[in-house]
Image (tube, helix red, strand yellow):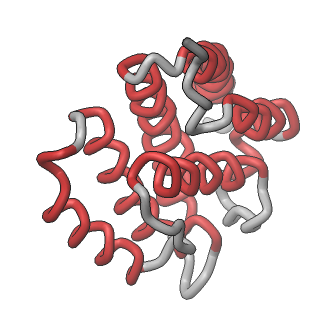
Amino acid sequence: MADAPTRVAPELTRYLDDYISEVALGEVLDEELEPGSNLLAFCRGAFDQLLANVVGVEAKRPSANSAVQMRTLMRKRKRQWSPELSRLMGRFQHFCKIYPDVTGDEYGGGSEAMTSFHTDFVPGFIRDLEAWAASEQEKELASALAHSRGDYDAWVQQFYDDLALGEGEDD
């Protein structure tokens, strides 16, 4: 019996890996992300593939309208989904809501929104996607995500370590 085709391409983690190798977290917290940034390409690509290949709906551009559509879909189908998929679809709904803040559409969310996106949303999304991949026997994806998660966590920790070293210097 042949393996089922991968529903979310493990190669997407390259966008995440490229992002953390190209920028320092402290440099991006005061600026919105370009829609074509590697970090957003990772997030959008993973959500697009989940929606199309797992949920069976056409991927939409992240927006307030897409968040409402996902809430409606979750009400209809949530009982059919695994807990891991339900968490991911909840994350997609949240991603749709914060996308304008992250990209600077409308008014943008400032450094607090960017910090939350980089240090809360993205690590949680990676963990939830990895948990889904493991539960679905998507071994190559789970392995790629585990590697990228370690690198991403170290990247965030380096920011906090650098910040701690700089404390008190301006006093």
Q: Please report the residue visible at 23 percent of the width from the left and 35 percent of the height from the top.
A: 82
Q: Please report the residue visible at 61 percent of the width from the left and 28 percent of the height from the top.
A: 156
Q: Is residue 168 left or right of residue 19?
A: left
Q: Is residue 142 above or below residue 17?
A: above
Total of numbered circles in the picture?
A: 0
Residue 38 seen by the camera? yes
Residue 70 found in image quarter: bottom left
Query: Quadrant where the N terminus lies?
Result: top right
Q: Is residue 82 left or right of residue 168?
A: left
Q: Is residue 101 left or right of residue 11?
A: left
Q: Residue furthest right?
A: 22
Query: Quadrant where the C terminus lies?
Result: top right
Q: Position of residue 7 (x, y in %)?
A: 56, 38
Q: Please report the residue visible at 42 percent of the width from the left and 57 percent of the height from the top.
A: 56
Q: Position of residue 167 (x, y in %)?
A: 60, 28
The one of 108 and 51 positioned closer to us in this rendering: 51
Q: Position of residue 135 (x, y in %)?
A: 36, 20
The one of 2 and 143 positioned closer to us in this rendering: 2
Q: Position of residue 20 (x, y in %)?
A: 76, 33
Residue 73 found in image quarter: bottom left
The one of 152 and 27 positioned closer to us in this rendering: 152
Q: Is residue 35 above or below residue 27?
A: below
Residue 57 found in image quarter: bottom left
Residue 150 seen by the camera? no
Q: Is residue 30 above or below residue 13?
A: below
Q: Is residue 77 above or below residue 131?
A: below
